[in-house]
Amino acid sequence: MELICPAGTPAAFREAVEAGADAVYCGFRDETNARNFPGLNFSRPELKQAIAYAKARGVQTFVALNTFMRAGDEDIWYRGAADAVAAGADALILADFGLMAHVAEHYPEQRLHVSVQASASNPDAINFLVEAFNARRVVLPRTLTIADIARIARQIRCEVEVFVFGGLCVMAEGRCSLSSYATAKSPNMNGVCSPASHVRYVAEGHDLVSKLGDYTINRFPEGEAAGYPTLCKGRFDLASTHAYAFEDPVSLDVMNEIDALTQAGVTALKIEGRQRGKAYVAEAVSTLRKALSATPQERTRLLTRLEALSEGGKTTTGAYEKRWR
Amino acid sequence: MRMATLTLGPVYFLWDGPKWRDFYKKIAHEAPIARVVIGETICSKRNHFTAPYMEEVIVHLERAGKEVILSSPALVTLERESRLMRELIGEATRKVEANDLSALHLLAGKPHVIGPLVNVYNAATAKLLAARGAETICLPPELPFSSVEKIAAITGGADYEIFAFGRVPLAISARCAHARAKGAVKDNCRFVCGDEPDGLAVKTLDRQPFLTLNGVQTLSHSCQSLIGETADLTDAGIARFRLSPQDCDMSAVATLYRAVLDGAMEAGAAAERLEALYPAAPLSNGFHYAREGAAWIAKARTGQHQANS
């Protein structure tokens, strides 16, 4: 089982390699990847150095070019693909069919991975991408149960990678325009969701109100820790009751299901968090690396340590369990 | 240039069978609509509500001269849903609209239509889909006009459609927020989404209307309308304008759009009439102008755009 680890900076990249990653994924410092946040990501020389550093230690590098090409500006994405291939990337993680077609045609030897942003959630969808673009691996959307994953893995002709730890999209990935509805910036087009540029915290009496664009996303009474206003994890008014309409501010943790995922035919486990600091990456990667080879009891003890790292200190197994629906 | 036509998108909401049938009968007799996309798109659990009326409705629409396209599911995760998709496409005697990648696989080489829920953000993708048999591509509602005109400039493949009326489909999930809002879960939902034929309002804690739940789908609170932008869109090569059914007089909505397309009514006046026809939601067109989707950009007579979000 491979452990696929995030890196938003060269420093986090080195931490991930040292902590036991089998592969590190990262992106360029522009709108070609879905973590296009200020102060994050890699310049061309940084990527080249990072790949060399990883290769020398037997670790692979995957480069995410997983936003959708803006009409008229396709060259930005095509140049990203060319530079990632030239730098020696072991795989490109892609979401846009147009970009997949370009890579399959111009770099037929390059490993192509289907990004979670492509939203390939069933065997026919995945086999379409395998046949059309020779995709070698699919990162499955976080909409499936472990039983679904096992069934799908039997019917497809490529490897399966799944998210096991970190941020959790509630909506089918790559199919969500909630962010651009409120802020004009979306994951698909701009590589951002609920961008910091549109976030405000406003004191109202004893409450702290978090806003995204013109909309209140949450209200925290004195004493409650204020979270980041990610749109789908906000508190809303639904038929006059106040509740987290879509999902609580939680993050994903299915590491306790490693054995079931292995049996389901999963090749690689992915940790979310390119926006997190190097200390987080070091701690998450080293602990999950140990958990992979630990006994079940030992694993539970190791994973408890990670709870402090999670959003709001709370985790969920998300769609991997049927009851979540 | 060929005269632009109107397409009626699938009813995204859960309407009971007789309401659904009567809606389409009225469309057949009254609405200046060329093409009707029909069939459950959002939740595979709902199929039995409309299935008994499907054949009757299709016959009615076709006798009235409408072209009927069969919609297909937007999110396919279960084995049962994969099977339904294969049956739908395998047995279809009419063109099918794809809303998920699985349909693209199964429709390869057959003439078909691409719905607004498939990610087509550039000409490279549009060309690829056209080469596989797509004859019409309804572009994603999130696309700004600057992208629409570049994609629509590609000729010789598919024709292009734009999402011109209706609450905007913004997201879909494996989880049913609508059922959860009513204390149920997806697998035991008792079809509570049917209680709101125009969706369940999600307001902010300040009671500002924001989003709309429709089962596993999340739509905008506002109603996207590009009735003021039809001239620019037809000039750019858009051949079809999609009207997405809301719980209002859709025949009258279609008549308004037709009048504007024919130059028989001024767009500003038509927008005012539209607000009266569908008072449940404010109009928006922000996506078209690369603004937040909820914004409404009023087009002044001088041609200047004035922000009024």
Image (tube, coloured by chain):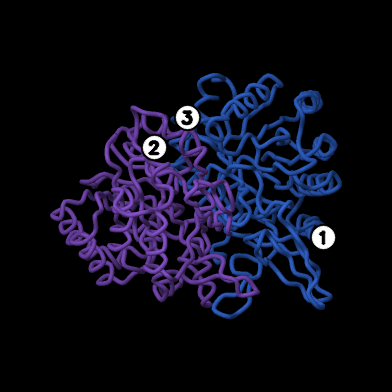
Chain colours: A blue, B purple
Note whether A242 is above or below A308 in the view shown: below
Q: Position of residue A144 (x, y in %)?
A: 53, 54
What amino acid does circle 3 point to?
Ala
* Residue B100 seen: yes
Residue at 48% of width from left, 42% of height from top? Answer: B119
Farthest front residue in view: B302
Residue at 70% of width from left, 68% of height from top? Answer: A218
* Residue A312 seen: no
CB under 8 Å between discs 1 and 2: no
What crowding class fits label 1: few (fewer than 14 Cα within 10 Å), some (14-19), or many (20 or more)? few
How much space separates mark 3 and mark 2, taking CA atoms?
A: 21 Å
Rendered image: mark on residue A308: 1
Rendered image: mark on residue B124: 3
Report the chain holding disc 1. A
Rendered image: mark on residue A110: none
Q: Are marks 3 and 1 on the same chain?
A: no
Q: Which residue is mark 2?
A: B235
Horizontal side, residue A123 vs residue B209: left or right: left
- Quadrant housing residue B156: top left
